[in-house]
Amino acid sequence: MKKKLFYWIPTTLLLIGMVGSAISYFMDIPTAAENFALLGYPGYVLYFNGAAKILGGLAIVLPVSRILKEWAYAGYLFILLLATQALYIMMPEYMAPMAGFYLLWVLSYWQFRVQS
């Protein structure tokens, strides 16, 4: 029971952050598009990023192959790395929350590997 909690708590928090932001991209919330523009990304990347976050979340939660889950975690890591780079260059004052996302990713992925 404890092992499952150690997996699902960070995974749920990670998915809330990732899928929640993706939903805001598709709801056409102006601040999401403005923030992407401030980071120097073209507008179409917003929807690609949102789709990747939602599909990755589904792969992590649904009972799919282990390899697909590994790819979903890798995709989330790439998204985090690109977001960190963009924030560091364009908005360095927002770097602190990224540490929390990395911590959640590491805990979730580590527990996924331990349980597999």
Image: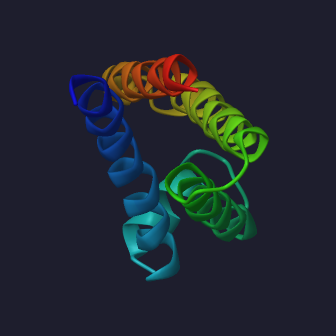
Q: Residue furthest front?
A: 1
Residue 103 rendering spot, x and y as whole percentages: 38, 19
Indicate whether 78 appears above or below 103. Answer: below
Residue 45, given in percent of the width and then of the height, sits at 72, 61
Q: Where does the N terminus fall, quadrant-wise?
A: top left
Give the tally of numbered discs: 0
Q: Quadrant of the C terminus?
A: top right
Q: Is residue 64 above or below residue 71?
A: below
Left or right, residue 12 beside residue 24: left
Report which quarter residue 75 is drawn in: top right
Residue drawn 66% across and 70% down?
47
Rendering coords of residue 10 (x, y %): 32, 33
Please state if 65 lies on the left or on the right of 36 as rendered: right
Quadrant position of residue 37: bottom right
Which of the 4 quarters of the picture holds residue 100?
A: top left
Name the residue at 50% across, 71% down: 25
Where residue 6 appears, as percent x and y from the top left, is 28, 25
Determine the residue positioned at 30% across, 24% down. Answer: 3
Q: Residue at x 75, y 47 (%)?
A: 68
